[in-house]
């Protein structure tokens, strides 16, 4: 009996506590609802807005122009090929290695070429001796002819032999120079400061004349080699600014200037090549990356809003203006997008100087009350530091 009485009293106490809780709603919950601008009991509550939550509509520069697509390529690049037929002995640089002008990159076997050089040098010495002998013989015949002891024909024959020896010596010297050049070409050197981008051979390979050995590029000479549709090329001029992104560099934007427009369109794609030089120090260090952007062919002033301030409802777009102490929905007439900034042109619905919410949400109501608060950074700074 006593056990049942204790259980009954415990249940009664619990029901009494629940009734008190229902009669006194918690105030922190209401403050949170006001701060978030959510509905309570079917009514929109007051919205607290800080200065950083709004922006002022203003006129800014709108860029318009054709799309340009292509890849990033170095202006200075060299495909180093074998100039002599020989076996590859050494490859001294790997892909990605930096090189200086004149550095030896590949060594070819010079054994047979060195033998040819020695043979040419021996032929040159023999031709030199033959010329000296024919010159001495000519001088003797000239002396004998002066004393009448030889015929004019003999003197003429000596001159012919001397001239022939001179020609042989000149040919021998040319063969020596050619052989020396062949020996020099067994050492493949870097034509400029840069980086090895593509190694094509390994030690032991046979390098025929014209075989590609490796490629060297200059990363500091990168440029955007783009293409523009032929029906838009009339708007493109040398010196126009270009904004573009490069695949592999995320949302980073690069700027450039149109340097050259190809005078002929591609026979297959009917696109025109446009060379764009980088502006500033920021540029990719990897060649061959895909790039896409816009040429700023036309610049005009327009009211602009960032995409974050726009709310889309089907084919309609609107923003939330702050008028006095209340929100007002403003239906917008939209224009084109600025490819440089990502903002949108607004042709109607707002005017310069209007205040709109920077990041509106779906719970806002037309006419909802708004209270402006102090800047968050300032309020945080005004709080006293906790005692240590």
Image (cartoon, rainbow, N blue to C red):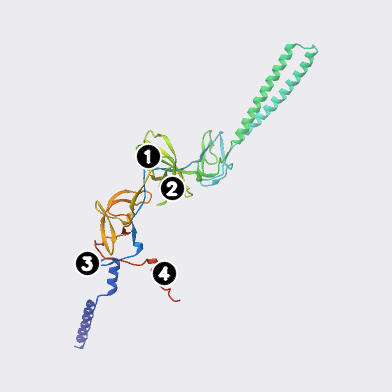
Counting residues from the start of the chain, the first of labels 2 and 4 encountered is 2
Image quarter for residue 310? Answer: bottom left
Say which mark, if any, is on residue 269. none
Q: Residue at x 64, y 25 (%)?
A: 171
Q: Position of residue 41 (x, y in %)?
A: 21, 69
Counting residues from the start of the chain, the first of labels 4 and 1 encountered is 1
Q: Which residue is mark 2?
A: 255
Q: Quadrant of the N terminus?
A: bottom left
Q: Give the structural element (helix, strand or loop) at label 3.
A: strand
Q: Give the structural element (helix, strand or loop) at label 2.
A: strand
How many C-alpha atoms fall within 10 Å of the one at disc 2: few (<14), some, or many (≥20)?
some
Q: Which residue is mark 3?
A: 43
Q: Which residue is mark 4?
A: 381
Counting residues from the start of the chain, the first of labels 3 and 1 encountered is 3
Q: Position of residue 17 (x, y in %)?
A: 23, 80
In the rendered image of this protein, does residue 14 appear above or below residue 94? below
In the rendered image of this protein, does residue 40 appear above or below residue 76? below
Q: Give the structural element (helix, strand or loop) at label 4.
A: helix
Say which mark, if any, is on residue 235. 1
Furthest-right residue in this view: 147
Q: Is residue 112 visible?
A: no
36, 183: nearer the viewer: 36
Q: Residue at x 34, y 62 (%)?
A: 53
How many C-alpha atoms fall within 10 Å of the one at disc 1: few (<14), some, or many (≥20)?
few
Marks 4 and 1, how far apart at CA: 52 Å
Q: Residue at x 72, y 16 (%)?
A: 158
Image quarter for residue 365? Answer: bottom left
């Amino acid at each position: 009996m006593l056990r049942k009485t204790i259980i009954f009293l415990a249940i009664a106490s619990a029901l009494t506590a629940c009734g008190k809780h229902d009669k006194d709603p918690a105030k922190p919950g209401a403050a949170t609802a006001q701060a978030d601008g959510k509905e309570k009991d079917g009514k929109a509550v007051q919205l607290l807005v800080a200065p950083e939550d709004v922006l002022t509509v203003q006129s800014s520069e709108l860029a318009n122009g054709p799309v340009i697509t292509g890849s990033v390529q170095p202006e200075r690049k060299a495909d180093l090929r074998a100039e002599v037929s020989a076996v590859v002995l050494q490859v001294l640089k790997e892909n990605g290695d930096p090189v200086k002008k004149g550095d030896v990159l590949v060594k070819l076997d010079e054994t047979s070429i060195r033998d040819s050089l020695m043979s040419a040098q021996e032929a040159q010495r023999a031709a030199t001796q033959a010329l000296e002998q024919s010159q001495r013989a000519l001088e003797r015949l000239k002396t004998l002819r002066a004393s009448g002891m030889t015929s004019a024909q003999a003197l003429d024959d000596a001159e012919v032999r001397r001239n022939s020896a001179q020609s042989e010596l000149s040919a021998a010297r040319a063969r020596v120079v050619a052989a020396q050049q062949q020996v020099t070409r067994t050492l493949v050197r870097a034509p400029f400061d840069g980086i090895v981008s593509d190694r094509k051979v390994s030690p032991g390979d046979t390098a025929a004349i014209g075989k590609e050995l490796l490629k060297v590029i200059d990363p500091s000479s990168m440029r955007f080699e783009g293409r523009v549709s032929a029906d838009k090329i009339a708007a493109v001029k040398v010196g126009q600014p270009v904004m573009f992104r490069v695949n592999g560099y995320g949302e980073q934007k690069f700027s450039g200037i149109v340097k050259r427009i190809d005078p002929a369109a591609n026979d297959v794609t009917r696109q025109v090549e446009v060379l764009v030089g980088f502006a500033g120090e920021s540029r990719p260090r990897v060649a061959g990356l895909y790039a896409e952007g816009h040429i700023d062919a036309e610049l005009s002033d327009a009211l602009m809003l960032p995409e974050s301030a726009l709310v889309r409802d089907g084919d309609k777009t609107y923003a939330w203006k702050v008028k006095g102490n209340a929100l007002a929905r403003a239906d917008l007439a939209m224009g084109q997008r600025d490819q440089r900034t990502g903002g949108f042109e607004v042709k109607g619905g707002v005017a310069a100087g209007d205040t709109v919410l920077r990041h509106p949400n779906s719970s806002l109501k037309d006419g909802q009350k708004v209270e402006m608060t102090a800047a968050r950074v300032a309020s945080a700074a005004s709080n006293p530091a906790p005692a240590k």
